[in-house]
Image (spheres, grey):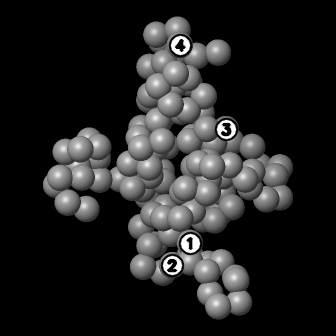
Amino acid sequence: MSNDVARKYGTTNPVLIAARVLHDPYDEFAWVQGWRFAICEALLHDWGYLTPGFRTVRSRPEDTMEYGEIRTLYVIEDDNGLESIDPMYWHVEDELKYALRILDRYREWLRIAGRDY
């Protein structure tokens, strides 16, 4: 990513950039929770990483706009329609974990400001 992208969005993390582009200024708590849940779903179902405190009983991820946006960053589809993680994007797991930590902090700031529910 270029320095221009980093200056514009304040980060080079593609997950956080997608979240910022789709930011909902009217309900920030719902926005941050939606992205947090989608990141946890991606980590669990695509990478096999269990996020502490996240549900584990779902056999498949919830189909949300946020989850779909995240998957466009690293999932490829072959000629038969089978999806797999592009080997060039092995580092995305770390980017997802980093984005989750940032959004966890943002959620905590919203709680402290009394803007959660």
Residue 65: where, in percent of width, then height? 63, 49
Left or right side of 26 for 6: left
> Considering only order in the chain, which callout, 1 or 4, is on the residue closer to the N terminus?
1
Q: Is residue 92 above or below residue 109?
A: below
At 25% from the left and 62% from the top, the residue drawn is 1
Task: Name the amino acid type tagged 1.
Answer: Val
> Considering only order in the chain, which callout, 4 or 3, is on the residue closer to the N terminus?
3
Left or right side of 9 for 68: right
Q: Is residue 61 above or below residue 32?
A: below
Q: Which residue is mark 3?
A: 53
At 42% from the left and 79% from the top, the residue drawn is 88
Kindly state the secondary structure of the residue where label 3 is placed: loop
Circles 3 and 1: CB atoms closer than 8 Å: no
Q: Which residue is mark 2?
A: 86
Q: Which residue is mark 4?
A: 115
Q: Residues within 10 Å of mark 4 (few under 14, many from 20)?
A: few
